[in-house]
Amino acid sequence: MKVLLDTNAYSALGRGDAAVAESVRRAQSVVFSVVVAGELLHGFRAGSRYRKNLATLEDFLDQSFVEFLPVTFATADRFARIAADLRRRGTPIPSNDIWIAAHAMESGAELLSFDAHFGSVEGLAFAQLTH
């Protein structure tokens, strides 16, 4: 099984969250969305430990079990289909989260997140984490 860490799941992993760590240990691989990286980098720049947080992220991404996913045309098409479906059903979610869901679906990964609204995305393999 592959997993894709949402931004909050990556942050929880860094804080030593046992449930997230166990999910990562059980996974065959971790896929990591460039959108999650962008959200993290934004947070790092707003904080006081940019260099430390960046180094930790780079070390994580350098692990052999982590695959970094760029946005492709296929990702953009999946994003558009998800966004249109959510709008049609009246259940919009944040745009970045639609991109993250698109990446999870494109890569065949289960999305790990604390955000319940991912449950609105039809066809998404989603494991809602709890605090």
Image (cartoon, grey):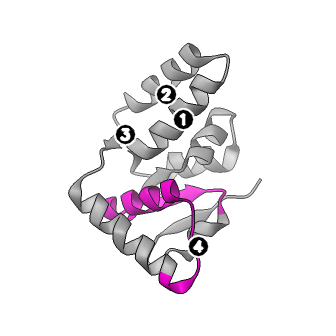
Give the number of callouts. 4
Q: Are marks 1 and 2 in contact (CB under 8 Å)?
A: yes
* Comparing labels 3 and 1, the label whose residue is closer to the camera: 1
Q: Considering depth in this image, is 21 or 77 the residue closer to the camera? A: 77
Q: Which residue is mark 1?
A: 40
Q: Earlier in the sequence, mark 4 or mark 1?
A: 1
Q: Is residue 18 left or right of residue 96?
A: right
Q: Which residue is mark 3?
A: 65
Element at label 4: helix
Residue lying at 30% horizontally and 59% vertically, measured from the top left: 75
Displayed quadrant of residue 102? bottom left
Q: Which residue is mark 2?
A: 57
Residue type at numbered disc 1:
Leu
Separation of marks 1 and 2 at Cα, in angstroms:
9 Å
Residue type at numbered disc 4:
Gly
Q: Earlier in the sequence, mark 1 or mark 2?
A: 1
Question: Residue 66: image x %, image y %?
Answer: 37, 39
Q: Which residue is mark 4?
A: 119
Separation of marks 2 and 4 at Cα, in angstroms:
27 Å
Element at label 1: helix
Is 106 inside the magenta-drawn segment? yes
Q: Earlier in the sequence, mark 3 or mark 1?
A: 1
Q: Residue furthest bottom?
A: 89
